[in-house]
Image: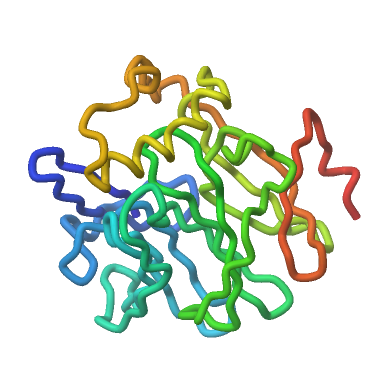
Amino acid sequence: MLAEDHGAGHTQTSTVLVADHLLGPYEIVRTGLRPLGMNAGDFDLVVAPDDGKGYYYFERVHSELLCADLTDDYTDVTGYYSTHFPRHRPPDVREAPAHFSRNGLHYLFTSGTTAYFPNRSEVAVAETYHGPWTVLGDPHPGDPAGTSFRSQISSIFKHPGKKDLYIALADRWLPHVRAEVAQRAPGMFRRMFSGEQSEPDPVLAAVEADTSVADYVWLPVRFEGDLPVIDWHDEWRIEDYA
């Protein structure tokens, strides 16, 4: 599934493609998808390993996060959904959901809404796909800047050849932006969306948002009991994990 932002009017739709193999070739089977008639922001798709049922996690723009059941062919939603993490406005609204399961529990990593600027991640846990979710806090306790190591988590996956190795894949949209600059973003978004400030922060406004230079951060996830924690590693090797 691919998300598309059509700009004018900020209409967001998705296109669904299918293939027999991961590398394709792909065939378009659905265009113009707006789940539940809504604009859908950042999303994650999850298929239950036991019964093949699909779930669509997405942001109701600037409002809350939704989990919607997918149809059997995964090309639409059934109409059944649940809502989670209601927040008043950006930057506190959650986006970029990244789901994974471990030991019978479901986890969601989410990001705050500060455009391309990184912010403090949040992790929540539940016993079912539809929650209810319990917020555990910031999975990056070793990052004093509160910018998730200047990245936004987009996917968590278990290494198929390791006993308990989960890997976080995160986008670094603005790799040239220093942490102390990114730290200004949540405050600016909070003031602007509350009406306290009308003009962008001049320091942030001067940042060139050239996402063509974006890169990725790959980090292992460790667990303190049931709490996922992501530490910074300048270098790490899959071979070092059992």
Residue at 63% over, 54% down: 138
Task: Determine the image quadrant of residue 18.
Answer: bottom left
Picture residue at 30% right of the left edge, 83% below the top: 80
The residue located at (56%, 24%) in the rendering is 180
**Percent x, y of residue 155:** 55, 51
Q: Image check: 95 left or right of 229?
A: left
Position of 162 relative to 68 (above/below)? above
Q: Residue at x 65, y 77 (%)?
A: 105
> In the rendered view, does 178 fall on the left or right side of 208?
right
Can you say whether 62 is above or below 200 in the image?
Answer: below
Q: x and y percent of residue 130 in the render?
A: 46, 80
Position above or below: 232 against 242? above
Residue 76 sits in which quadrant?
A: bottom left
Asked which quadrant contains residue 225, the reply is: bottom right
Q: Is residue 52 visible?
A: no
| Pick the front one: 20 or 4 | 4
Is residue 171 found left or right of 235 in the rendered image? left
The quarter in which the C terminus is drawn is bottom right
- Residue 235 percent across, percent down from the top left: 80, 30
Q: Is residue 188 visible?
A: yes
Query: In the image shown, does 11 or 205 lie closer to the viewer?
Result: 205
